[in-house]
Amino acid sequence: MMASTAISFATARQFMVDSQLRPTKVTHPAVLDAMRRIPREQFLPGALAALAYGDQDIDLGSGRFLMAPLAFARLAQLLAPVDGERILVVGSGVGYGAAVLAACGARVTALDSDDALLANGRAVHQALGLTITSQAGDPLAGLPGVQAWDAILIEGMIPAIPAVFAGQLKPGQGRLVTVRASQAVPGATATGVAVIAERQGENLALTSAFDCTTAPLAGFAPVPEFQF
């Protein structure tokens, strides 16, 4: 039975890539390969595992969600992870997104305020043989006081990009990808705009990329942000 279930999930994973991602402008080879290999169902509690490869956000409870595969894939493609880069995943949740980026060759740190979700992700990462650093902390603050990041992914919809993140990106090449809410819709999946913010001096230059439907990331209330 277990072998049959594993084959079923592997088939669903391949179908996700072929029917959800490839037809919808996801072409980044490393992202596609990673999402084909990383078992999304293992990051979910048993009752939710059957939903792993559907085309919707998965409600984890307590206001947290696992982003739908297509939304995540397009954000990861926009981030364009490069082998060996240092990437911070903010609001990493159960750890799936961090695993995909690590499978792309990045050196990933997962940041979340929820110890239980971090522990879940850490256990699955270890089981998969992935080297990912897990860090508990306030997502609004990022990880100050460490070496600047090549890239930051804020994994969910937020009302604004906190100004503190500019100083945590490498000058000249650091970039941040997230989804900015078009309007405040607390606790509900909604359509926002995927953006890439690149560090220029002490500021961020923001470019809108595409409309993106996903759930808000808990803990991100409006804070001082860069005005573009």
Image (cartoon, grey):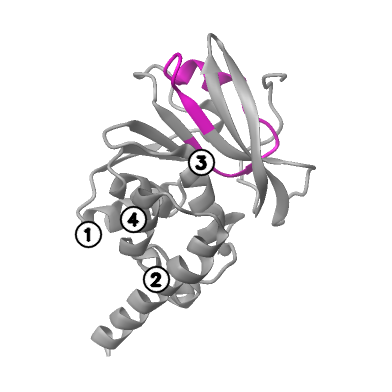
At a point 61% along the width and 45% down the height, the residue shown is: 218
Q: Is residue 137 above or below residue 205?
A: below
Which residue is disc 2 drawn over? 13
CB within 8 Å, label 2 to label 3: no
Q: CA distance from mark 1 to mark 4?
A: 16 Å
Q: Earlier in the sequence, mark 1 or mark 4?
A: 4
Of labels 2 and 1, the one closer to you: 2
**In the rendered view, does 2 fall on the left or right side of 165?**
left
**In the rendered view, does 68 fall on the left or right side of 28?**
right
- Quarter holding the N terminus is bottom left
Q: CA distance from mark 3 to mark 4?
A: 15 Å
Query: Which residue type does callout 4 highlight?
Result: Ala
Which residue is disc 3 drawn over? 78
Residue range corresponding to the magenta coloring: 153-176
Q: CA distance from mark 2 to mark 1?
A: 18 Å
Q: Secondary structure at mark 1?
A: helix
Which residue is disc 4 drawn over? 34
